[in-house]
Image (cartoon, rainbow, N blue to C red):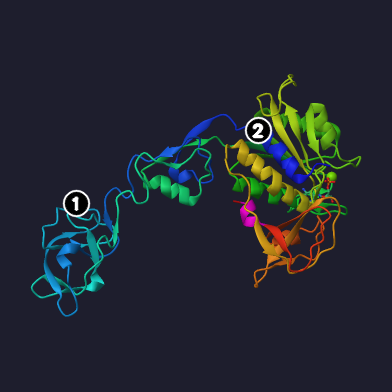
């Protein structure tokens, strides 16, 4: 059995970014990965702007202003946002609004609450402002010609806004990763179908489809494949044609009814199988041939990558989050694929496990510690809904109450 860290690094080393990029509207680019740096053609903001409704002045004109000796200035112009500003005549103030251009010559904005308009149209100031106050300098956010988003960035809502703030209407992104998925198990039925004795619902289809959708993949769902070697091989061959990754669920264990591993070996190869983790031990990785040439390594043209997930619902969920997610992000050209891990206090104790790395479903409690779900069986999907994330517990390690543990929130694993 391979240690999880070793297995993950081998998996990521094998992942090559898919070829092909496309130009998409910035509005449609959420979750896509940038194929090229985005460089700003302008300063943002493009001019000095006021960050308050008030008056633009030269601070020197208000030197010495106080409650007992206010300084009154005539208002020489009015500058709403989106309108050009004339230079500010010395000894005058400009009425100005949030987001409006600060007129040349003005160095300070006084907020309107600190100004008193008099009947003669002048405006009086009873305090000396600090020079530069309430002005956002040109280029304070972004400098012209700087790289604002490097290639490999996965586009979050904030990143889309940043790209739009420099005028990008379209973005060059890596093409979507194409994933084929199928489920093995003669016991599986779809919700909506009757459940005869011995049958269960194909819940993993729902979990895994939703996870793939979150990652922005192009997914072909090939449905449920019977527990037979020939049917499995035939489906693998079909899936290899048009997809970067073939993802399967179930049938990768050691039983006679587990046909996925031998089927992949017949149609390609298994390069990694069985990880020292709980849940998720039977995870398999390899490649399925596209043509007759089997000499090439996975992902280099003639092969489709293969990842076989265990069938137990918690196992397939956890192995997807910990292995398939970073792998798919790598295929899409993503740079930073590791989830952030937090150090948190365990408010429970837990017996020592075995030589496998445990991923325990836990929840953040009101005092900022972690509670453990009582049933950590890999068949108990309830734990994944109850929990907020996974405790990454090293092999052979007992957890004592109050100990600081490594916690990976689901939010990090689903970004
Ligand atoms: P397997 O990995 O095929 O040995 O399956 C392990 C366990 O997970 C068995 O109890 C299966 O019935 C169950 N299982 C397999 N596939 C699914 C699925 N798609 N949805 C829900 N449970 C499944
Ligand atoms: Mg099975």
Q: Residues within 10 Å of mark 1 (few under 14, many from 20)?
A: few
Residue 219 is marked as none
Q: Nearer the viewer, mark 2 or mark 1?
A: 1
Label count reads 2
The verdict on residue 76 being magenta is: no
The verdict on residue 413 being magenta is: yes
Residue underneath mark 1: 84
* Closer-to-camera residue (312/1): 1
Q: Residues within 10 Å of mark 2 (few under 14, many from 20)?
A: many
Q: Residue at x 29, y 62 (%)?
A: 134
Residue 98 pos. (x, y %): 28, 61
* Closer-to-camera residue (298/400): 400
Q: CA distance from mark 2 to mark 1?
A: 53 Å
Q: Residue furthest front?
A: 64
- Quadrant where the image shows the N terminus: top right
Q: Residue at x 11, y 59 (%)?
A: 90
**Image position of 414 with respect to 29: above or below:** below
Q: Earlier in the sequence, mark 2 or mark 1?
A: 1
Residue 281 pos. (x, y %): 82, 46
Mark 1 element type: loop
- The magenta segment is 408-414
In screen coordinates, is 359 left or right of 262?
left
Q: Is residue 32 in view from this perspective? A: yes
Residue 159 pos. (x, y %): 47, 48
Mark 2 element type: loop
* Closer-to-camera residue (16/67): 67
Q: Residue at x 48, y 35 (%)?
A: 36
**Image position of 101 with respect to 166: above or below:** below
Q: Is residue 223 in view from this perspective? A: no
Residue underneath mark 2: 244
């Amino acid at each position: 059995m391979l240690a999880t860290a070793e297995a993950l690094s081998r998996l990521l080393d094998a992942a090559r970014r898919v070829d092909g990029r496309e130009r998409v509207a910035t509005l449609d680019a959420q979750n896509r990965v940038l194929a090229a740096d985005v460089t700003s053609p302008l300063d943002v903001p493009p001019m000095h702007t006021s960050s308050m409704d008030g008056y633009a002045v030269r601070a020197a004109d208000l030197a010495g202003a106080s409650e007992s000796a206010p300084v009154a200035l005539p208002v020489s112009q009015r500058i709403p946002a989106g309108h050009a500003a004339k230079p500010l005549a010395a000894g005058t103030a400009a009425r100005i609004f949030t987001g409006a251009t600060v007129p040349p010559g003005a160095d300070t904005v006084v907020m309107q609450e600190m100004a008193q308009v008099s009947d003669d149209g002048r405006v009086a100031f009873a305090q000396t402002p600090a020079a530069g106050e309430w002005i956002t300098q040109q280029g304070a956010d972004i400098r012209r010609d700087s790289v604002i988003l490097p290639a490999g960035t996965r586009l979050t809502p904030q990143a889309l806004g940043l790209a739009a703030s420099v005028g990008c209407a379209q973005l060059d992104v890596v093409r979507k990763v194409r994933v084929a998925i199928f489920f093995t198990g003669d016991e599986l039925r779809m919700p909506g179908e009757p459940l005869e004795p011995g049958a269960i619902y194909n819940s993993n289809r729902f979990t895994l489809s939703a996870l793939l959708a979150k990652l922005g993949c192009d997914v072909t769902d090939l449905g449920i494949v019977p527990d037979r070697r020939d049917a499995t091989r035939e489906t693998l061959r079909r899936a290899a044609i048009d997809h970067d990754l073939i993802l399967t669920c179930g049938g990768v264990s050691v039983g006679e009814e587990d046909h996925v591993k031998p089927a992949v070996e017949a149609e390609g190869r298994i390069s990694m199988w069985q990880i020292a983790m709980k849940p998720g031990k039977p995870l398999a990785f390899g490649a399925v041939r596209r043509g007759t040439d089997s000499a090439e390594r996975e992902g280099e043209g003639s092969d489709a990558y293969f990842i076989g997930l265990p069938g137990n619902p918690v196992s397939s969920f956890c192995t997807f989050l910990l292995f398939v997610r970073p792998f798919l992000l790598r295929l899409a050209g993503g740079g930073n694929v590791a989830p952030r891990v937090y150090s948190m206090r365990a408010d429970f104790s837990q017996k020592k496990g075995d030589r496998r790395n445990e991923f325990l479903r836990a929840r953040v409690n009101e005092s900022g510690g972690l509670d453990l779900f009582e049933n950590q069986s890999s068949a108990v999907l309830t734990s994944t809904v109850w929990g907020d994330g996974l405790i990454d517990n090293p092999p052979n390690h007992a957890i004592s109450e109050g100990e600081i543990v490594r916690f990976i929130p689901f939010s990090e694993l689903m970004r």
